[in-house]
Image (cartoon, rainbow, N blue to C red):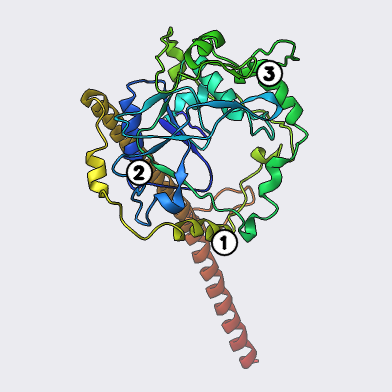
């Protein structure tokens, strides 16, 4: 899905809605990190109470509350998982974090190419987010909590169409033991069986020991060592690899564990009307009211990235839009030319010779004249024959 020309990539849950002008807000927040390897990520708010039908943010005014993941815990099977989010207030800009959340992640697309989701973590809920966090951090990427909410989740449960679907995460799918082996291999747990991770392993820009010092979390033992790191993290520099920016996606495996192991090789299914209706339900539960601070005022108080950085970013976006329009026009022109050529071939073709060559217009006219001549001669011979018969 990540194409070579894609600049920014976002991962979200399927059932979310967005603030109006979310695209500009996301790019501004990313630019405010002043970090090419910055990743915006946190848990998302509740669409039912935090977003209006017009796409305006209702939550936390005038303090601009944002979900803030400030701690990890030991989850199922002894792995590290994110704790519940607390609330951060009045953040002037995105804030450095030691956790990554799968429900909302926004970064340059070279992040997705260098640290793609591990497709072999079948059924792994606890530990999936932390495993990607330790991978991205050792690859030189840094996670920042966005300073404004932009994405909102539909947390409604118990709908008729949800029955029988929500319990799938509670089981133990057949691929889970292998997923856990991959997790323990990644964090280098002592005594655990190790497996080959391929392109889904740690990076070389930073080490696990550096992450322990940075976050106060020891992934080898799943212990939270320092409770006083939240809000006080210090950026850890590294030797940059310029090739990462131009990386390509690793080859996706053709065989995966689980019941959907071949789904990525099949054409996407048609969207059924009922699922469109289900998605529309999310809009109907949003509040029909406006925020205490207007949307325009919120944009004014949003803050701005460095002018030079923002100008360069908007220039690249403008150039990409121009290239896309040119590609569309070129494609339309090529399709139009093909159609014209096909029509011309049809209009100048009246039949084919035995060898399959096209009959020319001149040959066609000669055949018509010859046919008419034969018909005329035949008519005259018939008339002469009838006159002769009368004389007899």
Residue 339 appears in the rendering: no
Q: Name the secondary structure under disc 2.
A: loop
Whichever of labels 3 and 1 marks the residue nearer the N terminus, that label is: 3
Write down the residue under mark 2: 60
Q: Nearer the viewer, residue 387 or 366?
A: 366
Q: Quadrant of residue 207?
A: top right
* Mark in front: 3 vs 2: 2
| Residue 313 visible in the snapshot | yes
Residue under the image location 76 percent in, 27 percent down: 177
The Cα–Cα distance between marks 3 and 1, rounded to whole angstroms, is 43 Å
Instruction: Mark 1: give few (<14), some (14-19) or many (20+) Cα within 10 Å.
Output: few
The residue lying toward the viewer, choosing from 318 and 114, is 114
Work out which residue is located at the far right of the displayed protein and give it. Answer: 174
**Which residue, as the protein is rendered here, is positioned at the far front?**
227
Q: Residue at x 43, y 42 (%)?
A: 151
Report the side of 180 relative to 391 (left or right): right
Count of marks, rendered view: 3
**Element class at badge 1:** helix
Give whichever of 275, 82 is nearer the camera: 82
Q: Position of residue 217 (x, y in %)?
A: 55, 17
Q: Position of residue 122 (x, y in %)?
A: 69, 33
Q: Which residue is mark 3?
A: 184
Q: How far apart are labels 2 and 1 at the CA level? A: 36 Å
For marks 2 and 1 on the same chain, the one whose residue lies earlier in the sequence:
2
Q: Position of residue 185 (x, y in %)?
A: 68, 16
- Identify residue for label 1: 273
Determine the residue positioned at 67% across, 29% down. 121
Which of disc 2 and disc 3 is earlier in sequence? Answer: 2
**Mark in the foreground, 3 or 1:** 3
């Amino acid at each position: 899905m990540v194409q070579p020309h894609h600049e920014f990539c976002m991962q979200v849950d399927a059932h979310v809605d967005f603030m109006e002008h979310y695209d500009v807000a996301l790019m501004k927040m990313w630019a405010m990190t002043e970090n090419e390897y910055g990743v915006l990520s946190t848990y998302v708010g509740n669409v039912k109470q935090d977003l209006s039908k017009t796409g305006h943010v209702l939550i936390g005014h005038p303090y601009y509350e944002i979900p803030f993941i400030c701690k990890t815990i030991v989850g199922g099977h002894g792995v590290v998982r994110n704790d519940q989010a607390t609330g951060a207030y009045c953040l002037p800009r995105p804030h450095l974090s030691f956790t990554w959340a799968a429900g909302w992640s926004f970064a340059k697309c070279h992040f997705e190419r260098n640290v793609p989701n591990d497709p072999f973590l079948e059924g792994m809920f606890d530990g999936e987010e932390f495993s990607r966090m330790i991978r991205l951090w050792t690859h030189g990427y840094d996670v920042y909590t966005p300073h404004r909410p932009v994405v909102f989740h539909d947390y409604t449960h118990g709908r008729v169409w949800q029955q029988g679907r929500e319990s799938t995460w509670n089981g133990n799918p057949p691929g889970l033991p292998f997923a856990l082996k991959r997790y323990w291999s990644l964090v280098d747990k002592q005594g655990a069986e190790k497996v080959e991770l391929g392109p889904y392993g740690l990076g070389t820009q930073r080490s696990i020991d550096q992450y322990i010092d940075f976050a106060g979390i020891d992934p080898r033992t799943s212990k939270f060592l320092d409770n006083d790191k939240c809000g006080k993290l210090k950026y850890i520099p590294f030797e940059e690899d310029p090739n990462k920016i131009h990386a390509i996606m690793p080859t996706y495996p053709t065989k995966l564990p689980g019941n959907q192991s071949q789904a990525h090789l099949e054409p996407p299914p048609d969207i059924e009307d009922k699922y469109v209706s289900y998605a529309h339900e999310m809009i109907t539960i949003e509040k029909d009211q406006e925020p205490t601070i207007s949307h325009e005022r919120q944009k004014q108080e949003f803050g701005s990235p460095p002018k030079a950085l923002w100008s360069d970013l908007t220039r690249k976006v403008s150039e990409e839009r121009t290239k896309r329009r040119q590609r569309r026009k070129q494609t339309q022109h090529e399709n139009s030319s093909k159609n014209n050529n096909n029509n011309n071939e049809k209009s100048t073709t009246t039949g084919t010779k035995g060898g399959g060559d096209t009959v020319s217009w001149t040959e066609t006219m000669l055949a018509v004249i010859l046919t008419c001549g034969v018909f005329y001669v035949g008519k005259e011979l018939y008339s002469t024959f009838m006159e002769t018969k009368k004389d007899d």
